[in-house]
Image (spheres, rainbow, N blue to C red):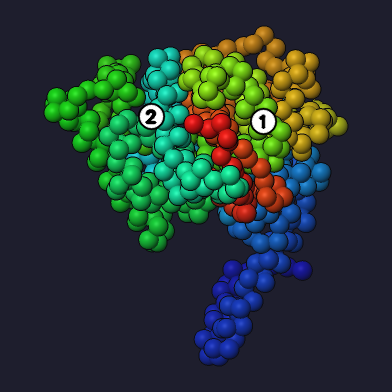
Amino acid sequence: FTMPSTDAWAGYFAQAGTTLSDNPSYLLLALGSFPIVAVVLNVLNQFLPKDRTRPPVVFHWFPFIGSAIHYGMDPLGFFLSCREKYGNVFTFILLGRKVTVALGAAGNNFILGGKSNVFNAEDAYTHFTTPVFGKDVVYDCPNDKFMEQKKFIKYSLTGDRFREYVGMITEEVEGFIKKDETFAAYQANSKEWAKFDAVETLSQITILTAARTLQGKEVRDNLDKTFAHLYSDLDGGFKPINFLFPNLPLESYRARDRAHKKIADFYIDIIQKRKSGTTENVDDVMGYLMQQKYRNGQQIPDHEVAHMLIALLMAGQHTSSATGAWATLHIAENPELVEVMYAEQVKHFGNPDGSFREMTFEEMRDLPVLDAVIRETLRMHPPIHSIMRGVREDVPVPTSLASPDKEGGVYIIPKGNYTLASPIMSQMDPSIWVHPERFETARWTDPEGFAKQALRTYDDKDGEKIDFGFGLVSKGTESPYQPFGAGRHRCIGEQFAYLQLGVVLTTLVRHLEMKLGAPFPGNDYTTMITMPLAPRDVYYRRRPTAV
Ligand code: HEM
């Protein structure tokens, strides 16, 4: 067999072109068979001898689409089946992107502990986050500038401010159950059971409490009016389709962009009024950011303050509301646990007339049952199941990371790929957690509990602390428990989220008995943040003691 010459190929194509244009049915046939040819070539290509320095590629029928459907519908199931076939390190195709996964605690450490000029977050996220958050913040600026922004935000979310937040959040939740129509049975003092949708209710409560605390009075007051639909339009930009296609000529994209502009303008207007003295300067997060300077001496420009505030609200909204919804469903599934949480409240804060005194921030951190409920919810339902980075340089991975019996070799993850670490895989791993599929608060409350033992094995050997530019944090990249990520991109909202979730859950428990009316819901992975599938109703009844 000899390859035809270039001229011969040109002749064949010219001939084929003439035949096709002379006879349209050939053209249709040729076009119609194109997908079949593409599938066949794609499959054949996967059976050709492999470059052994590359991680194995997950078998897929369709080019471009790759494993998007299996991963998108059931990431945990997808990772488990891939681990069985390929080990802990493999590459899959996600709508044209090559994504190399490193599973397990060692995989998380490899990716999250890597250098940011090699494993880069901006490359993985900016197309998706910048239209929502805005320019010059988070992933739309150099990493060291973002680390300074994280430091400003982290320092604005501590101490005295947190102390005030407890009262504000309690007031919002109580106001909600006293006014919202979902809680009509509560308001009517009825002894009957009624229901609320866990996702709907917890997302509304989350945005109200986050706006009141993080965004300030002006924003909270407007949330009942024009802002609700603007936030919903902006939120429409946080869907998987936006992750895959940053800009499409669709109304939801235009609505996202309009909403971003209006909200940012609204914040900038408040900032300017505060600066000019037209309105009072308030000691809130906005006020704090307005006073800060970057290391180069530059004051944070108004639009960056506005964009950071939007980022704060959006980063916390889905993550906290999903966790709140899952936690409410888990406690309602086990009405005894609702009562144990209630007893914990009575013991620490109960008044003789059945009312409660306000918790302080410090006291709240010392409630083992509440703490265990939140921790266990985050173990089973980390809202961010996949953490991605863009690969900026060819990176060697020891093959022993893929499997202990592959000692001694290396794979190269090529520049241009993406990498993925999955907290949910290590948090649901049966070799680390006893019965990981069970919601067991005892994992965390028993001093010799199995969760603590599992974690101790992996805890950073010497409790190593690092400053990536936003204050000292424990390295944490080796832990199999990472609902808040680890390393340079670790969450700075963790303490706020615990505070918000803690006050929301205890306020509900103080006023309501709860139970489930249907089997526990499964996972909806098709939303960016894993949500419970409908129906996800929680049945509630007003406590006889509620005041
Ligand atoms: C980063 C989870 C709440 C702000 C992260 C990351 C995770 C996470 C996994 C790491 C992402 C990565 O490495 O790519 C959560 C969970 C929350 C929560 C589970 C609630 C239960 C919040 C809240 C805020 C917030 C309330 C704001 C007040 C941030 C910010 C980052 C971050 C600014 C830094 C991103 C980076 O450095 O790249 N979060 N988060 N989060 N989170 Fe959260």
Residue extending farthest to the bottom is 23
Tag 2: amino acid: Leu
Q: On screen, 312 above or below 362? A: below
Q: Secondary structure at mark 1?
A: helix
> Does residue 405 appear in this view?
yes
Occupied quadrant, residue 414: top right
Question: Does residue 286 appear to the left or right of 366 in the view shown?
Answer: left
Give the CA distance from mark 2 to mark 1.
31 Å
Residue lying at 61% horizontally and 47% vertically, measured from the top left: 193
- Residue drawn at x 63%, y 71% as measured from the top left: 35
Pinpoint residue 122: horizontal percent, then vertical percent: 47, 36
Residue at numbered disc 2: 214
CB of mark 1 near ligand 1 (< 8 Å)? no
Foreground pick, 167 / 77: 167
Disc number at residue 140? Answer: none
Q: Secondary structure at mark 2?
A: helix
> Are the residues tagged 2 and 1 within 8 Å (C-beta)?
no
243, 502: nearer the viewer:
502
Label 1 sits on residue:
339
Q: Quadrant of the N terminus?
A: bottom right
Residue 71 appears in the figure: no
Mark 2 or mark 1, which is nearer to you? 1
Label 2 environment density (alpha carbons within 10 Å; few <14, some 14–19, many ≥20)? many
What residue sits 30% from the left and 51% below the top?
258
User: Within 8 Å: ligand 1 and the Cβ of disc 2?
Assistant: yes
Which numbered disc, 2 or 1, marks the residue that appears first in the sequence?
A: 2
Which residue is at the front of the view, 97 or 489? 489
**Residue 121, position in %: x, y?**
51, 34
**Mark 1, residues whose alpha carbon is within 10 Å: few (<14), some, or many (≥20)?**
some
Residue in view at x 53 percent, y 23 percent:
353
